């Protein structure tokens, strides 16, 4: 399914348009994405960087339009993100999953992490930023001392947005090449990602706006089962209801309950405007 979106705008479309239903969906396999040329281009990237601001939290990030231009100028002119932009779509199932935008619930979760820093310990923690896009959540964890794995569906988003954003937020006095080694980057489908380095588990999993597609709920929960440490927690920020696609917090809570592996609680809500929530998910004791 496809959500209409103009990359030059910051607001989300209220009424997504749907593409014709496909009987079989082929998802991209997961692969590790290793930082390469981004470190060489860092000074030029920094000249045009913007600032994500949430209260006292400030995180530098690349300009979306410039990142998109770089993606479109890549040698692979058939990359999924470029194809999605040409069709003016924000989300195209199994092709492009919205990684170029900093979605609204990201602000909610950053603010929540900041306000609860006394109980959510990030220093030296192993953190997974799942469906990371620009990587704001993972970068917040990184600058607070965590070892972070960034996962996004589209490889080109990691190459042109996520990795440059992480580099922008490494202190100039620190060794950039050494510090970036504290991070890992993986593209592809959640089911495929779950099969990579299967012994790896995480103390904290952060994920925002990833439950809009009900068809992916089983994959997401299976990933939590395999990758969340026994004493760890998932913090999932989402809209209460995603109109036009059927997904939302209540539907995901129901799926979690039926699975039986986890317990969940609503730890934050916003009832003004578009209703949004944060779920804390932990293993059943």
Image (spheres, grey):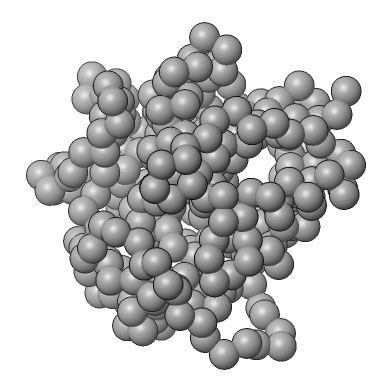
Residue 59 location in percent, x, y? 28, 33
- The count of marks equals 0
Residue 121 sits above or below residue 261 on the image = above
Query: Can you see residue 192?
Result: no
Give percent across and percent down for residue 131: 53, 51
Viewport quadrant of the C terminus: top right
Residue 179 screen position, x and y as percent = 40, 28
Along the line of sight, which residue is nearer the eye, 192 or 7? 7
Looking at the image, which is closer to me, 142 or 74? Answer: 142
Looking at the image, which residue sits at the far top? 118
Observer-nearest of 25 and 69:
25
Tell me the quarter of the image containing the N terminus.
bottom right
Q: Residue at position x 87%, y 48% from top? A: 259
Q: Quadrant of residue 100?
A: bottom left
| Residue 241, horizontal then vertical, whole percent | 57, 56
Q: Residue at position x 89%, y 42% from top?
A: 260
* Residue drawn 26% across the image and 38% down it: 52
User: Which residue occupies 71% across, 67% down?
Assistant: 215
Q: Image height check: is 127 above or below 158?
A: above
Above or below — where is 27 with respect to 228? Answer: below
Residue 275 visible in the snapshot: yes
Query: Which of the 4 quarters of the picture holds residue 267?
Result: top right
Q: Is residue 222 left or right of residue 105?
A: right
Q: From the viewer's perspective, is 236 left or right of 137?
A: right
Residue 281 falls left or right of residue 65:
right
Residue lying at the far left of the rendered structure: 47
């Amino acid at each position: 399914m496809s959500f209409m979106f103009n990359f030059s705008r910051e607001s989300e479309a209220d009424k997504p348009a749907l593409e014709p239903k496909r009987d079989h969906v082929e998802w991209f396999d997961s692969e590790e994405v290793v930082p390469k040329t981004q470190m060489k281009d860092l000074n030029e990237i920094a000249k045009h960087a913007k600032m994500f601001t949430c209260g006292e939290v400030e995180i530098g990030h690349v300009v979306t339009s410039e990142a998109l231009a770089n993606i479109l100028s890549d040698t692979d002119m058939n990359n999924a993100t470029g194809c999605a932009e040409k069709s003016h779509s924000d989300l195209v199932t199994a092709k492009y999953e919205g990684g170029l935008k900093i979605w609204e619930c990201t602000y909610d979760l950053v603010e929540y992490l900041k306000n609860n820093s006394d109980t959510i310990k990030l220093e030296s923690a192993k953190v997974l930023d799942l469906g990371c896009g620009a990587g704001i959540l993972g970068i917040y964890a990184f600058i607070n001392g965590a070892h972070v794995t960034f996962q996004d569906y589209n490889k080109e988003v990691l190459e042109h947005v996520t990795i440059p954003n992480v580099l922008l937020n490494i202190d100039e006095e620190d060794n950039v090449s050494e510090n970036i080694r504290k991070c890992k980057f993986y593209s592809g489908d959640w089911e495929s990602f779950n099969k990579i380095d299967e012994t790896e588990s995480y103390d904290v999993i952060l994920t925002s706006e990833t439950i809009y597609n009900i068809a992916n709920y089983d994959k997401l929960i299976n990933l939590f089962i395999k990758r969340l440490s026994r004493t760890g927690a998932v913090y999932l920020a989402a809209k209460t209801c995603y109109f036009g696609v059927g997904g939302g917090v209540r539907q995901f809570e129901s799926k979690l309950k039926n699975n039986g592996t986890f317990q969940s609680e609503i730890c934050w809500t916003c009832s003004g405007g578009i209703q949004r929530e944060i779920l804390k998910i932990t293993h059943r004791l």
